[in-house]
């Protein structure tokens, strides 16, 4: 017995579509609406990277346009042998490690507190997330002018009030000049702690509460439960937060540019690449440095994806 579609096709004189071709047509019909987004993503992300990769192998300085040509791996050699670039790498490592470690510790403590039940917990969680939603440049300007400023900043104002209680002359330090790198780190910690808190809070809410309650009934203390059960459960969430935070903080430019303008030993890799490109106009060397940073970020992202996939496998196996 033939179907209505087959009869219609036979009347029209055209053969009915085969099952395989019908499936392919259906698949392409589903994917076709995604093609504009895919093409846009390729044009916006991949083509600029290919252009950067090509320029990284060229001797291209805007001050010497007549000397432009193919340079091979010379730009990469100059990047690895440049003392300013090595200092920028070291500054980037210190900045990233400091922000990630402090944000993880603070995020863990806040997540443990917000995991408890208390009145107004939803409102407190919303307020704790707020710093992560602030525009990075606005957050850096807030710390530079509203907090760090030696004349009217909040920190020196608090010191004036505290020292005034004892009738002493308060110190008025210039926070950015006295501790430039820590000034950038504290501003980034304030912004990234909510991110770590969200990841760890999600991990805490996935704990097996029945096992924890059984351990508490058996006489285990709060510290023993945290050390032997909660912390091992949060290990992958801690790794995920550290890896994702490292990916973003390695690329941070806003805080360094806004708070210190790269001075006083705070120039990290993105800021150094910016100065090579816009100040020295050495497009080839800046592109080579950018390619190296992208490769390093890809390696970190690969570790992050492996951690996420292992986390999903563990959750699905429960």
Image (cartoon, rainbow, N blue to C red):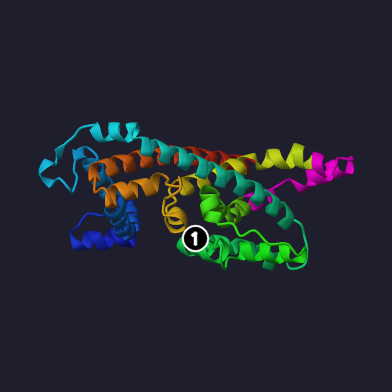
Circle 1 SS class: helix
Q: Quadrant of residue 158?
A: bottom right
Residue in the picture at 61% in, 40% down: 236
Q: Is residue 107 located in the magenta-colored stretch of the structure?
A: no
Residue at the disc numbered 1: 140
Vertical arrangement, residue 253 with respect to residue 293, above or below = below
Residue 125 pos. (x, y %): 66, 63
Between residue 103 and residue 278, name the one nearer to us: 278
Between residue 123 and residue 91, name the one nearer to us: 91
Residue in the picture at 51% in, 61% down: 144
Vertical arrangement, residue 178 with respect to residue 89, above or below = below
Q: Quadrant of residue 89?
A: top left
Residue 242 pos. (x, y %): 56, 43
- Judged left or right of residue 2, residue 302 is right
Range of magenta residues: 200-224
Type of secondary structure dominating the magenta stretch? helix
Residue in the picture at 61% in, 43% down: 238
* Quadrant in which the N terminus appears: bottom left
């Amino acid at each position: 017995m033939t179907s209505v579609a087959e009869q219609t096709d036979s009347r029209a004189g055209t053969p009915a579509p085969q099952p395989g071709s019908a499936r392919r047509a259906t698949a392409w019909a589903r994917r076709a609406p995604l093609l504009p987004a895919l093409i846009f993503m390729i044009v916006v992300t991949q083509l600029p990277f290919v252009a950067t990769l090509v320029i990284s192998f060229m001797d291209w300085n805007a001050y010497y346009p007549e000397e432009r040509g193919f340079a091979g791996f010379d730009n990469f050699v100059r990047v690895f042998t440049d003392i300013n670039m090595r200092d920028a790498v070291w500054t980037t490592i210190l900045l990233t490690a400091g922000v990630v470690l402090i944000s993880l510790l603070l995020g863990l403590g806040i997540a443990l507190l917000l995991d408890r039940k208390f009145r107004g917990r939803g409102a407190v969680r919303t307020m704790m997330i707020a710093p992560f939603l602030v525009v990075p440049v606005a957050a850096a300007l807030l710390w530079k002018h509203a907090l760090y400023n030696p004349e009217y900043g909040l920190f020196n104002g608090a010191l004036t009030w505290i020292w005034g209680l004892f009738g002493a002359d308060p110190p008025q330090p210039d926070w950015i000049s006295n501790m430039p790198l820590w000034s950038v780190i504290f501003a980034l910690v304030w912004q990234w702690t909510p991110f770590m808190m969200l990841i760890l809070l999600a991990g805490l809410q996935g704990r097996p509460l029945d096992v924890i309650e059984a351990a508490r009934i058996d006489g285990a203390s709060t510290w023993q439960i945290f050390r032997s059960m909660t912390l091992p459960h949060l290990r992958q969430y801690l790794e995920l937060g550290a890896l994702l935070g490292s990916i973003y903080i390695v690329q941070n430019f806003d805080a360094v540019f806004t708070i210190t303008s790269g001075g006083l030993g705070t120039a990290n890799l993105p800021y150094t690449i910016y100065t090579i490109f816009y100040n020295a106009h050495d497009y080839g060397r800046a592109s080579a440095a950018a390619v190296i940073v992208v490769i390093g970020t890809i390696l970190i992202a690969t570790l992050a994806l492996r951690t996420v996939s292992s986390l999903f496998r563990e959750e699905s196996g429960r």
